[in-house]
Amino acid sequence: MTTTAGGPPARPIPTPSPLSRPFWEGTKQGVLRLQQCTRCGGFEWTPQMACSRCLEETLQWVTATGRGSVYSYSVVHRPQGPAFVPPYVVAIVTLAEGPHMLSDLVDVAPEDVRIGMDVEVAFEDVGEVALYHFRPARGPATTVPTGAAPRGEVIP
Ligand SMILES: [Zn+2]
């Protein structure tokens, strides 16, 4: 494991797969991407080969709002390894588009986290990839378009 001078060991970083590569290319560019079904318009997280609602196999990557709310969370006091410095918050975020996303919460004291609090994505470039985190939202929520047609910015 790589170590940083004087600090904890470097955190393990994700290795993009062919399926998740568009997502990680997005985080590197500072955008959160989700797959969207071209038939029913539903959003997917984690990356899927087919829509979990209608089984359509054509999913397109779109730019998400990057906004959501805390569905549930836990304060970690005994981390899984020395690279993670406790206490830190692990949360399930309900994205504005619907899917739940597991993440950590940053820029907030563990005792200040609340179920339902509005959060927004933040990115941390760590070299090969950019990690995503969520932090308390700093501005008004972005409206998520509704309807069955494909939504959002389409990523070619
Ligand atoms: Zn579908």
Image (tube, rainbow, N blue to C red):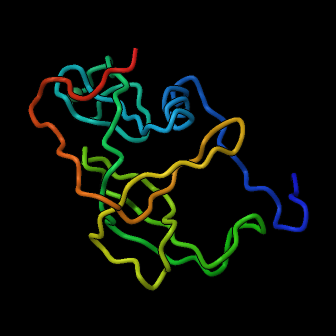
Classify the position of the C terminus by image quarter. Answer: top left
Q: Position of residue 145 (x, y in %)?
A: 14, 37
Q: Position of residue 77 (x, y in %)?
A: 62, 81
Farthest residue to the left: give it: 147
41 left or right, relative to 52: left
Residue at image x 81%, y 66%?
A: 8
Q: Nearer the viewer, residue 131 or 91?
A: 131
Residue at image x 47%, y 74%?
A: 108
Question: Is 129 above or below relative to 131?
Answer: above
Q: Quadrant of residue 80?
A: bottom right
Farthest residue to the bottom: give it: 111
87 left or right, relative to 82: left
Farthest residue to the right: give it: 5
Q: Position of residue 39 (x, y in %)?
A: 18, 21
Question: Is 62 above or below relative to 65?
Answer: above
Quarter of the displayed picture in which ligand 1 can be seen: top left
Q: Position of residue 70 (x, y in %)?
A: 33, 66
Question: How many numbered circles are shown?
Answer: 0
Residue at image x 61%, y 32%?
A: 16
Farthest residue to the top: give it: 156
Question: Is 127 above or below relative to 117?
Answer: above
Residue at image x 34%, y 61%?
A: 137
